[in-house]
Every structure is written in structure tokens, then in C-alpha cells.
Image (spheres, rainbow, N blue to C red):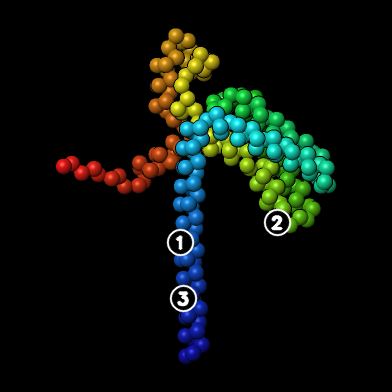
């Protein structure tokens, strides 16, 4: 009888632990979503500062690759492809906050992200490194700058049109403003996704009329 009670208590605590994990993960996801929403709003408001921050991140990543070349015994292909990917990121940054998804620098940056992940997994699966070091390499060298670009996708929604934007906005160069505002009706980006989720999922507050 006592053994049966102990077994039931163990199963009860086991199920309770899973419920606690689900609750903790829910709070973590909500916190990350709130943080990303706040960062996306800051990026949309401070576009010039965001461009400078991303450029600094790219240069710091290049310096990290140089440090790994000098102080670590990593393959040359891993270092060269990593530096080339940062060069592509600098080329993409020239048109910030506007992104041409079919341009050669953008496609090259995406290709180098895939190549760097392949080379990284191939090397670290054959040579032992502590998990913290492997995770820090992937986080700082492979994920940080692409994540900054991903969060900045909606940064061009509040930028006023210029003559330099005429071709991507419209084929008629005399109607820049009209096509700009028609283009603004179709928003794509992280902030637009959060706004859509907020309007469609969260309950709307009804204003009282006195």
C-alpha cells in the first residue's frame, strides 16, 4: 500500500513538473515576443542609429574572425567564408533600410549563411569543443548580424520617399508619392507581424462613450 502511494506521488510530481515547464516556456516566449516588439519599434523610429549599430556589429564580427585566425586552430575555409559573409552584409547595408531581396549582395549573404552553418557543423562535429564555446561561435559569428537584419525588415515603413527610390517604387518617375503610399498599405516585417497578431489575437479594448 505504501509503495503504491509513493508511486502515485511520483507520477503526480512528474505531471506537475511538465505543467510547470509549459508555464515557464509560455512566459519565456511572451517575454521574447515583447522584447522583439519593443526592439522593432525602436529600429523603425531610429533608422540611422540602427544602421550604425549594425555596421559596428559587422566590424566587430570581422575582428572576431581575425582573432580566431590568430589565436585558434580553425580551418581557413571557416574563417574566409565568415569574413566574406560580413563583406556581403556590408554591401546589403549600403541600401539600408531598403532591402532588395533579388540583389546579388542579399542573395550572396543568404548563401554564405548556409555555407557557414554547413562548415561550422562539419567542423565542430569532428573536433571536440565545449558546448558553450560552440554556442557562442554560432550566436556571435553566424546569428547576430542576420538577426539584426531580420528585425530591421520593417524599418523602411516610415521612411519618406526620395528620387533614389523611384525605380523600386514605380515605373512612372512622376508619381513617387502616390506609389509610395500605395506601397505602404502592404507592409512586411517583424513589427507588422506583431501588429497583425495584436489586432487578430488579443482582445480589443472598447472605449466608453460618456
The span from disc 3 to disc 1 (Cα, nearest Å) is 17 Å
Classify 181 as above or below 172. Answer: below
How far across and down, in percent of the image, does residue 44 sit? 48, 33
Please report the residue visible at 39 percent of the width from the left and 39 percent of the height from the top.
196
How far across and down, in percent of the image, does residue 49 sit? 56, 32
**Disc 2, disc 3: CB below 8 Å?**
no
How far across and down, in percent of the image, does residue 61 sit? 70, 39
Specify whether residue 116 is in view. yes
Please report the residue visible at 65 percent of the width from the left and 26 percent of the height from the top.
91
- Judge the density around disc 2: few (<14), some (14-19), many (≥20) Cα neighbours within 10 Å: few
Classify 157 as above or below 197. Answer: above
Work out whether residue 98 or residue 116 is closer to the camera in this orientation and state it: 98
Work out whether residue 66 or residue 125 is closer to the camera in this orientation and state it: 66
Work out whether residue 112 or residue 198 is closer to the camera in this orientation and state it: 198
Indicate left or right for 144 with 201 as reference. Answer: right
Disc number placed over residue 131 in the picture, else none: 2
Which quadrant of the figure has residue 65? Answer: top right
Indicate left or right for 76 with 50 as reference. Answer: right
Work out whether residue 17 or residue 59 is closer to the camera in this orientation and state it: 59
Quadrant the C terminus occupies: top left
**Disc 1 element:** helix
**Disc 2, disc 1: CB below 8 Å?**
no
Mark before the other along the chain sequence, 3 or 1: 3
**Disc 2 element:** helix
Q: Which residue is mark 1?
A: 23
How far across and down, in percent of the image, does residue 142 sit? 67, 42
Q: Which residue is mark 3?
A: 12
State the residue lying farthest toward the top. 174
Please report the residue visible at 69 percent of the width from the left and 55 percent of the height from the top.
132
**Disc 3 element:** helix
Please report the residue visible at 40 percent of the width from the left and 21 percent of the height from the top.
181
Mark before the other along the chain sequence, 2 or 3: 3
Amino acid at each position: 500500500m505504501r509503495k503504491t502511494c509513493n508511486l502515485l506521488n511520483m507520477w503526480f510530481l512528474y505531471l506537475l513538473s511538465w505543467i510547470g515547464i509549459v508555464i515557464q516556456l509560455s512566459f519565456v516566449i511572451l517575454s521574447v515576443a515583447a522584447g522583439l516588439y519593443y526592439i522593432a519599434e525602436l529600429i523603425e523610429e531610429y533608422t540611422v542609429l540602427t544602421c550604425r549599430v549594425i555596421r559596428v556589429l559587422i566590424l566587430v564580427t570581422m575582428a572576431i574572425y581575425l582573432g580566431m585566425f590568430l589565436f585558434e586552430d580553425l580551418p581557413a575555409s571557416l574563417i574566409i567564408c565568415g569574413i566574406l559573409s560580413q563583406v556581403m552584409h556590408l554591401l546589403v547595408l549600403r541600401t539600408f533600410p531598403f532591402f532588395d531581396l533579388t540583389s546579388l549582395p542579399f542573395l550572396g549573404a543568404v548563401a554564405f549563411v548556409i555555407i557557414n552553418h554547413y562548415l561550422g557543423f562539419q567542423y565542430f562535429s569532428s573536433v571536440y569543443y565545449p558546448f558553450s564555446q560552440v554556442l557562442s561561435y554560432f550566436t556571435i559569428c553566424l546569428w547576430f548580424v542576420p538577426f539584426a537584419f531580420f528585425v530591421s525588415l520593417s524599418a523602411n515603413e516610415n521612411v519618406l520617399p526620395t528620387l533614389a527610390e523611384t525605380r523600386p517604387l514605380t515605373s512612372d518617375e512622376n508619381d513617387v508619392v502616390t506609389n509610395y503610399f500605395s506601397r505602404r498599405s502592404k507592409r512586411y516585417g517583424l513589427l507588422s507581424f506583431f501588429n497583425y497578431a495584436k489586432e487578430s489575437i488579443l482582445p480589443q479594448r472598447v472605449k466608453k462613450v460618456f
